[in-house]
Image (cartoon, rainbow, N blue to C red):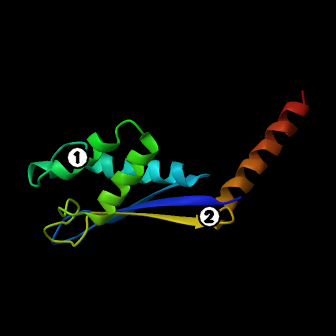
Amino acid sequence: MSVFIVTATHTDDDYKRPYVSTETEMATSREDAVLLAVGFYLDRLDGGYWFDHYDPSGFSKIVEQHRSNPNTLMSALLEYFERDPEDLFAGEYVPEILRVTISESENIPSDVEPTLSTIDEISRYIKEELGKD
């Protein structure tokens, strides 16, 4: 089973101390991964700040053109954001304030394994404690 890993890298536009953080989500289908990626971009634009500085007509055109088919709309928006025709995600002091990537893996990422192990340990502990009564 393939797993799609969507990673958003946020960089604060601070010329003295740029701060980088990442968010990661997993999806089991390409369509869900595209939806998550578009969600990361839309979260950044939600305040409307970036559209104050750039012409949003390209964005609006895509939405109008594909509104009736959500899968096509999400794919078109992802392509629009990845192409970044209006430099929506360019900072003044850093080249990119947001970068979203989608990668595919045949396995669960290794960093999930310790969490699954902890869940198993807690589950065993709960079963043992419930069995003492």
Residue beneath disc 1:
61
Local packing at callout 2 (Cα closer than 10 Å; few below 14, some 14-19, many 20+) is: few
Quarter of the image for the C terminus: give it: top right
**In what element is the residue under mark 1?**
helix
Q: Residue at x 16, y 52 (%)?
A: 50
Q: Residue at x 78, y 42 (%)?
A: 123
- 58 and 103: which one is in front? 58
Res 88 label: none
**Image coordinates for residue 89, horizontal then vertical, percent:** 23, 61
The image quadrant that residue 68 belongs to is: top left
* Mark 1: amino acid: Lys
**Image coordinates for residue 63, horizontal then vertical, percent:** 29, 43
Whether residue 31 is situated above or below residue 15 in the rendered picture:
above
- 43 and 102: which one is in front? 102
Residue at the extreme left of the image, as rendered: 53
- 75 and 99: which one is in front? 75
**In what element is the residue under mark 2?**
helix
- Left or right: where does residue 14 sit relative to residue 38? left
* Mark 2: amino acid: Asp
**Image coordinates for residue 32, horizontal then vertical, percent:** 52, 48
The image quadrant that residue 17 belongs to is: bottom left
Q: Earlier in the sequence, mark 1 or mark 2?
A: 1
**Image coordinates for residue 74, horizontal then vertical, percent:** 40, 48
Q: Residue at x 71, y 54 (%)?
A: 116
Q: How far apart are the alpha carbons under marks 1 and 2?
A: 40 Å
Residue beneath disc 2:
111
Q: Residue at x 33, y 52 (%)?
A: 41
Local packing at callout 1 (Cα closer than 10 Å; few below 14, some 14-19, many 20+) is: few
Quarter of the image for the N terminus: give it: bottom right
